[in-house]
Image (spheres, grey):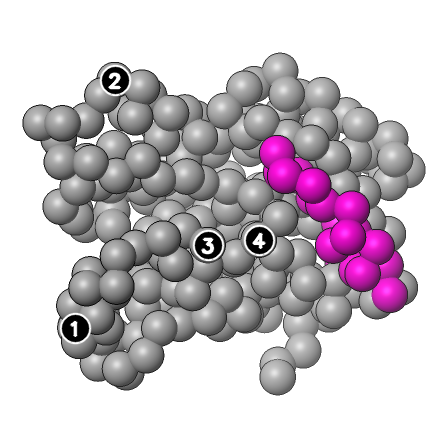
Amino acid sequence: MPRYDLTGKVALVTGAASGIGKATAIRLAKEGANLALGDLKDLSELCDSLKNYGVKVVALKLDVSDYSSCESFYKSALSELCVERVDILVNNAGINRDSLFVKMSFEQWDDVIKVDLYSMFNMTKQVVPKMLENSWGRIVNVSSISWLGNIGQANYSAAKAGVIGFTKTLARELAKHGITVNAVCPGFIDTPMTRAVPEKIREMILSRIPMKRIGNPEEVASVIAFLCSDDASYITGEVIGVTGGLVL
């Protein structure tokens, strides 16, 4: 496994309770990063286990759809970690509320846009000022291959496409300040979200994947860890698929 030394860096990961967020938190801890983890779900067990890697970890409740929650989370995380800034932000939190558009309620649309897209502004706004002062930062936004469009996901696809536009714009604005901004687009990954997909649909998707298997969260976390490292210092504004060849 490649080693990306993040010793002494402070990384903030949203949606850290399960799936890609949890795998990312574990991988970054293995690389030596101190962690601020946010989720609406309980994180105490994960927090305790990560401390075994010899890093500082704080886990707090976080509603990424609410700006004031993000603001309070950020201030509390800095205080508990006894640091002045976050060096790495992984915007991972997301939900889906799938439905054909003709049946989609406003609430289904609104919930997904707020969690999956508003969260990008809400969390990134907290970390960028200090990154600018330090002339170093890594922002990784978790989008989805669904940004290309997917039946039953008008809300989710719109939000994830918005993440791509946000990523590329921010990359242009922050590049000269030593801050990179990239997006990772997972395909069909074994997470609680995809496990809820009906078996027939899972089989159909699997038949379209050239590698003939579902990906695992650790494979996405490896790409995120790379983008957070100095090894990726000349990569910004990129959209990296982790799909097993699904879009070939």
Q: Secondary structure at mark 2?
A: helix
Residue type, mark 4 in image: Ser
Question: Which residue position is annotated with label 4?
Answer: 18
Bounds of the magenta segment: 33-52
Disc 1 packing (10 Å; few <14; some 14–19; many ≥20):
some
Give me the C-alpha separation between circle 3 and circle 4: 8 Å
Disc 2 packing (10 Å; few <14; some 14–19; many ≥20):
few
Q: Identify the residue at image location x=21%, y=40%.
A: 153
Give me the C-alpha separation between circle 1 and circle 4: 26 Å
Question: Which residue position is annotated with label 3?
Answer: 192
Residue type, mark 1 in image: Arg
Residue type, mark 3 in image: Pro
Instruction: Where is residue 86? Give x, y as percent.
Output: 72, 41
* Along the line of sight, the residue nearer the viewer: 7 or 152: 152
Number of the label disc, if any, that sits on residue 208:
1
Give me the C-alpha separation between circle 1 and circle 2: 32 Å
